């Protein structure tokens, strides 16, 4: 039986791609991989995010996707400065202008891992894992 090994990309529906690039560009350093009519492809090292026009549904409730960042507190400050709709809760969740629910976690605190080569290519060589994240990886035989 085939095994899941990761996520190559996520498609995020937005109302307007140019507005979405401006919004997310205020929050994060973006590297545009490419564009086609109605879509923009944003690199995240060895993965990418697709911003696609066509969002018509109501704001997301429980449905969300998670992003991993190098600095959670800097992300929180940036979200506040940009006037983003930060959601209440124990983590850092926000809703973009099109109703997409985005959860943000810090790289050091989760089992998600980039190879040293990918980190170097992203200019993130110094990122470390917390003891709890290393323990979680070890329990699964991944670290």
Image: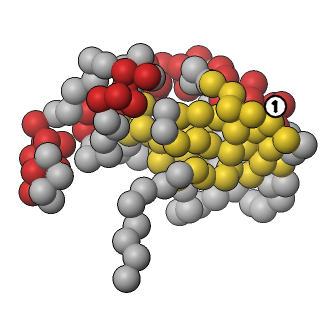
The relative height of residue 72 versus residue 2 in the rendered view (above or below) is above
Q: On the rendered structure, is 131 left or right of 126?
A: left
Q: Residue at x 63, y 24 (%)?
A: 31
> Is residue 22 visible to the viewer in this orientation of the structure?
yes
Residue, far bottom: 1
Identity of the residue drawn at 59% across and 33% down: 43
Q: Classify mark 1: helix, strand or loop.
A: helix
Q: Residue placed farthest to the right in the image?
A: 37
Residue 73, percent across and down? 38, 23
* Structural crowding at the residue carrying mark 1, measured as other residues with C-alpha within 10 Å and reported as few (<14), some (14–19) or many (≥20): few
Residue at the (76%, 38%) spot, across then down: 40
State the image quarter where residue 38 is shown.
Answer: top right
Q: Where residue 8 sits: x, y (%)?
A: 53, 52
- The image quadrant of residue 2 is bottom left
x then y, percent, for residue 36: 85, 41
* Number of dots carrying numbers: 1
Q: Is residue 85 above or below residue 12?
A: above
Horizontal arrangement in the rendering, residue 19 relative to residue 70 (left or right)? right
Q: Is residue 67 left or right of residue 136?
A: right
**Which residue is more in the foreground, 83 or 122?**
122
Against 123, residue 139 (above or below) is: below
Of residues 68 and 94, the one nearer the viewer is 68
Residue 15 visible here: no
Residue lying at 37% horizontally and 71% vertically, measured from the top left: 3
Q: How is the image coloured?
A: secondary structure
- Residue 42 horizontal side relative to residue 87, left or right: right
Residue under label 1:
19
**Depth order, front residue of 115/62:** 115
């Amino acid at each position: 039986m085939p095994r899941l090994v990761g996520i190559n990309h996520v498609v995020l529906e937005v109302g307007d791609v140019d507005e979405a690039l401006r919004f997310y560009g205020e929050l994060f350093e973006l590297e545009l991989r490419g564009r086609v009519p109605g879509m923009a492809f944003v690199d995240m090292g060895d993965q990418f995010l697709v911003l696609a026009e066509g969002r018509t549904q109501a704001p997301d409730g429980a449905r969300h996707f998670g992003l991993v960042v190098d600095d959670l507190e800097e992300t929180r400050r940036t979200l506040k400065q940009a006037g983003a709709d930060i959601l209440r809760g124990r983590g850092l969740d926000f809703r973009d202008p099109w109703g997409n629910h985005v959860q943000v976690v810090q790289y050091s605190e989760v089992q998600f891992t980039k190879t040293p080569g990918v980190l170097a290519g992203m200019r993130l060589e110094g990122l470390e894992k917390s003891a709890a994240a290393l323990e979680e990886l070890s329990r699964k035989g991944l670290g």
